[in-house]
Amino acid sequence: MGVCISKVPQPQPEINIDPMPTIQTQKGNYSMSSLPAEPRRGDKKRQAKIEVIEEQIHENVVKQAKEKSPFDFQMILNAFGNHFMFAQLDNDDKAKLIDEMYYVTAKNADYIFKQGDKATLFFIIERGDCKIIINEEVKRVLKTPAFFGELALMYHAPRSASVQAIGDCGFWVLERKKFRKAVEDIQQKAYETNRKFLDQVKFFDFMTEEQRDSIANVLITLKFKQGEIIVNEGDMANSFYIIQKGIVSVTKQGQFLRYMNQGDSFGEQALFGNCVRGATVKANDEDVNLLSLSREDITTILGEKIQLHSQSFIQICRNGHLKNILNQEILLKLSNFKIKTYESKEYLFSKNQMIDKLIIILDGQLEFDGQLYNNGQLFGDTFLQVEESKRKISSDIVTTRKTTLSELPFKQFFECIGGELETVVKKNKDRAGSSSLLEKRQKSNYSLLTLEDFIGLQLLGEGTFGNAYLVKDIPQQNLHVMKCVPKVNIIANNTERHIKNEKQALDLLNHPSLVCFHRSFKDQNYIYLLTEYVKGKELFHVIRDLGLLNSYETQFYIAQMINILEKLHSYHIIYRDVKPENFIVMENGYLKLIDMGTAKVLKSRASKTYTIVGTPHYMSPEILKGKGYTFSTDLWSLGICFFELMCGEVPFAGNEDDDPYIIQEAILNGRVEYPQFLKDFKAIKLMDQLMNRTPELRLGGSYDALKVHSWFDGFQWEDLEMMEIKPPHIPKLQQSKYEEIPFLDMIKRDTSPDMICNVIVDWDQEF
């Protein structure tokens, strides 16, 4: 029996990622405040970076027309088997990669590449030997069928060594872009297959789309040969199985019970709690493939406190009578359902009785008034209203087979929600109206303005790819930020799609905690992005004013960051650069997220992206591995911020270490070590969850589940949303004096000759 998805050694990255076109300000992003006089944390701000995938081959080799022989194919396959990067792939997937490889040669004494060169190819030596040279010293000699340059498949990095041919050499090579595309296709295909199977299994019907997406990503593929035992009767049960391929046989006490086929599942009870296997399951085909889900993974995905049965209740309620009364505090209280098992034909209620409890069908079936209720369905919600609760039922409620239910008495339910249903619904609607007024903001119409309608006040920040200016519009005299990105920089760095991503994300934003985008402009030389001016101070500087934050202070900021990420992710925006520098503490003490330079809109919640982007100290392991990531990467970065607020530095490689190799080795291979002074063990538990190396386990199934983590016990989420919690810090802002000159004159003054764009582009139509 073999496991297709297994833990493999982590890479030792050689990486020097190109800088991202994001604006780093001199006085705080879009803020006019200065650095604290005596900072208690590292003062060095960290820049976001982005990988650039190049098309050009940089290695000194000559491509040859040569077909792969069976011997060549097997040699390459064996080489793949010896490296962790290919461990996740089965032989069919490896064969697809081998098809993408081609043959190249190098002459005796030629340098195939030199230390510091750009890297694009992975090499397997077919004939000849090669010297590995570092700092002009020969470190070792590689012989057939050794491989080298494998990290070029993962990172846009300069070569860390030189390689010189000893004699005439031949190599089979794989281009980085083809490897990345093949792995992307393979992983997406595997995910889609797993996701499709989940939709065929009734057990998962009650879950949200997001929860099923998460589960599809943590499923493990197991392979069995004919006659192998999958589970033994009487063994402890902690996994649930779905048959992906083949047939299995089920026996109990040596007696054959039945066969199970593709799409069938077994072991559901293992997910509810401790139990033993009730039967033996054996592979009955030559090849049997199973998808396995552990109890630990599903309970993490569905939340720390909200157990499986109450989670199903919550999801169903959102689409029914109760959707207007649920908030995070109530969700926590509603985890007290009792699980009870009934035999077949057992009566729950008899005719003329009154219903007095809510019921979730976990496994089995109920019959009432000629209607059948199946797994995952809610029963009793229609009797919650005052008038209905007094009505006697017209027929018996009976099980049709052995059935497991989750039950909550009406009395306990009313205590949880804070009163009778009608009263609570009305109160929540009134409050929701106030909240919606706070959230909605009318975007001013800037469509008639031109660049001539702005006065330039101050250069706020200079970035590698552009500048940010404080400007004032002449008609309304309002302050704004104008981000200016030279087209020549965009062209030179192949970042057309990144500036488009930024605008696409900005267009979607409409929330008081997210920077407001007004419009874009363009001319011959620049792309311009006009946003609101957020007066305040970066969280980066505020936490240096405050020193180490206590639990209350940290909750205030982390809770807002959670709300902001929830809103972004609801727009299908993945941010990819969550760090204190990108949050402004406004004049009222609350946070606002600025700068969408690294943001990207994904097509769906199940989509992945593969670009290596972000600030190294805050980048998640899955970004560094280059094998695809989604919204959960932002939660890893949130965990880094959480640690930084309470512990005074980032957990991997510390505040002052800027060596990308050290930072990324620590993220990929290191472990989080908490300082002895940190005694808030609930906070540590939540940090561990957010910095889980399995991305799907960070959220806990939903943002609602994350918000009822034990660290937030007693925290008033609704008060936070209404801005009714007193902030721990109000920034002191200095008045600044500005020069006032026409904005275009300011741009002309700051435009050097090498910023003049002398080519006509067609990618700027949407600006």
Image (cartoon, rainbow, N blue to C red):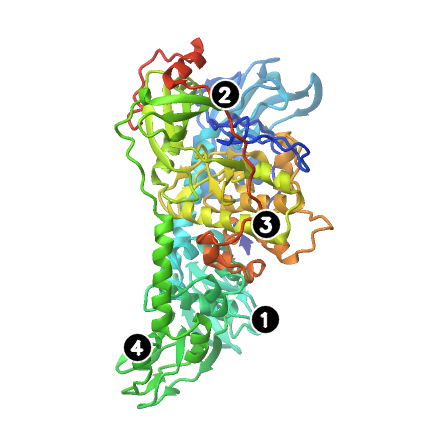
Q: Distance between the residues labelled 1 and 3?
A: 44 Å
Quarter-wise, where is residue 764 in the image?
top left
Answer whether labels 3 and 2 touch (C-beta < 8 Å): no
According to the picture, the residue beneath numbered tag 4 turns out to be 372
Q: How far apart are marks 3 and 4 (CA)?
A: 49 Å
Residue type (three-letter) at the residue carrying disc 3: Thr
Answer whether labels 1 and 3 touch (C-beta < 8 Å): no
Q: Where is residue 82 in the image (x, y as percent from the top left)?
A: 59, 38
Q: Distance between the residues labelled 2 and 1?
A: 55 Å
Taking the image as shown, residue 538 lies to the left or right of residue 216, namely: right
Q: Tag 1 or tag 2, which sits nearer the N-term?
A: 2
According to the picture, the residue beneath numbered tag 1 turns out to be 235
In this picture, is 342 found above or below 679? below
Labels 3, 2: front one? 3
Q: Where is residue 226 in the image (x, y as percent from the top left)?
A: 49, 61
Labels 2, 4: front one? 4
Mark 3 Cα-neighbour bin, 10 Å: few <14, some 14–19, many ≥20: many
Q: Which residue lies furthest to the right in this view?
A: 676
Taking the image as shown, residue 433 lies to the left or right of residue 286, namely: left
Q: How far apart are marks 3 and 2 (CA)?
A: 56 Å
Labels 1, 3: front one? 3
According to the picture, the residue beneath numbered tag 3 turns out to be 554
Q: Nearer the viewer, residue 245 or 139?
A: 139
Residue type (three-letter) at the residue carrying disc 4: Leu
Q: Tag 4 or tag 2, which sits nearer the N-term?
A: 2
Q: Tag 3 or tag 1, which sits nearer the N-term?
A: 1
